[in-house]
Image: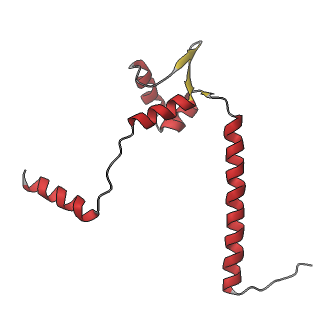
Amino acid sequence: MTKIIQLNAKDLRSEIKSCFIESIEELKAISIHQNEDLPDRCFMEEACCITGFSESKIYKETMKRTIPFEKYGKRLVFSRKKLLEWMESRTKRTPNITMAEYLSKNLNRRANL
């Protein structure tokens, strides 16, 4: 027979919060161990996931030799580490501006057209 426990709203929030925090800690531990077990090499499908590009875009980038890759027989092979470094090197940092500054800048630009 199941025992029913009644909690007030404050205790219920506290219990949910502790369960949530415990679950997050478990997930962090799992993802850390999974990353340690992975070899650095990956193939097209994972390269698409890492970069967010489609297969055709990755093929175009390899033809232009802009994306880091190697060949294993006829297959393309990528280094996760090199892909992440390549993505970081191509990432542009944008300054944090307020919405008012953004709108003001765009209005000034349109007024000059």
Nearest to the observer: residue 79 or residue 6: 79
Q: Quadrant of residue 77?
A: top right
Nearest to the observer: residue 33 or residue 58: 33
Residue displayed at 35% across by 41% down: 92
Looking at the picture, how far across and down is residue 11, in whole percent?
Answer: 71, 82
Q: Quadrant of residue 38?
A: top right
Q: Residue furthest right?
A: 1
- Tell me: 68 left or right of 36: left
Residue displayed at 48% across by 33% down: 85
Looking at the picture, how far across and down is residue 41, in whole percent?
Answer: 61, 26
Looking at the picture, how far across and down is residue 56, in whole percent?
Answer: 44, 28
Looking at the picture, how far across and down is residue 31, in whole percent?
Answer: 67, 46
Residue displayed at 13% across by 53% down: 109
When the figure is inspected, residue 72 is found, relative to residue 51, above or below; the finding is: above
Query: Coloured how?
Result: secondary structure
- Tell me: 67 left or right of 38: left
When the figure is inspected, residue 26 is found, relative to residue 88, above or below; the finding is: below
